[in-house]
Amino acid sequence: MLRLAAAAFSALALLSVSGAWAGEHTSAAASCAVTKPNGKMPAGVAVNSDSYGSDALGTLLWPQGKVVFVPGGSGFILEDGSLSMKFPWWRGVTGKLTITGRRLDGAAPPLRARIPGGYGDTGFQASGIIFPTTGCWEVTGSVGEASLTFVTLVERVASAK
């Protein structure tokens, strides 16, 4: 009985990770050309397999270019249904970070961003990016004349009923 329960749990986990239960899932996954990490970051910032950036600005991309909202997982579903996920940024140039974005595969309001103060003018900057809907999104972070743009797929996995 314990083996059967473990097998069932493994199957459920595989379905949820694969997106087989994705609520609001569209053909966006097939047509969204997500950005791949390039292994670059501003000077002095450690690089890992999710690093994407330049000498001026860098961030970490979510695995496989997908921001996946799973019940009990990372991120927040706001009262209006928008999906909020944390993104770290590193500034190699001086200035305030701004973040803008638009949905590429359908109509949607522009994304919003929460960028808290207290991080100084260079180096690390925390942020929360708020996607109004699921879909394929182009996100641009800017500091002064420098900018960094990436494409990510936003998915929401429905809870089991």
Image: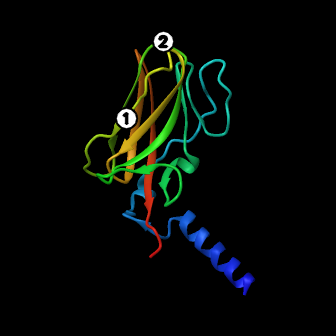
Q: Residue at x 55, y 45 (%)?
A: 62
What x and y, as percent, mark residue 19? Answer: 50, 65
Relative to 64, 95 lies left or right: left
Relative to 85, 123 lies left or right: right
Label 1: which secondary element:
strand
- CB under 8 Å between discs 1 and 2: no
**Vertical side of 62 occupied by 22: above or below:** below
Q: Nearer the viewer, mark 1 or mark 2?
A: 1
Q: Residue at x 28, y 52 (%)?
A: 80
Residue 7, label in figure = none
What x and y, as percent, mark residue 106? Answer: 28, 52
- Which residue corresponds to mark 2? 94
What x and y, as percent, mark residue 9? Answer: 64, 74
**Vertical side of 14 occupied by 132: above or below:** above
Front-lying residue, 149 or 129: 129
The furthest residue to the top: 94
Label 1, residues with CA under 10 Å away: few <14, some 14-19, many ≥20: some
Q: Residue at x 25, y 50 (%)?
A: 107
What x and y, as percent, mark residue 76? Answer: 43, 50
Quadrant location of residue 156? bottom left
**Vertical side of 34 occupied by 47: above or below:** above
**Vertical side of 81 occupied by 49: above or below:** above
Label 2: which secondary element:
loop
Q: Residue at x 37, y 54 (%)?
A: 134
Label 2, residues with CA under 10 Å away: few <14, some 14-19, many ≥20: some
- Which residue corresponds to mark 1? 113
* Among numbered discs 1 and 2, the one appearing first in the sequence: 2
Mark 1 residue type: Ala
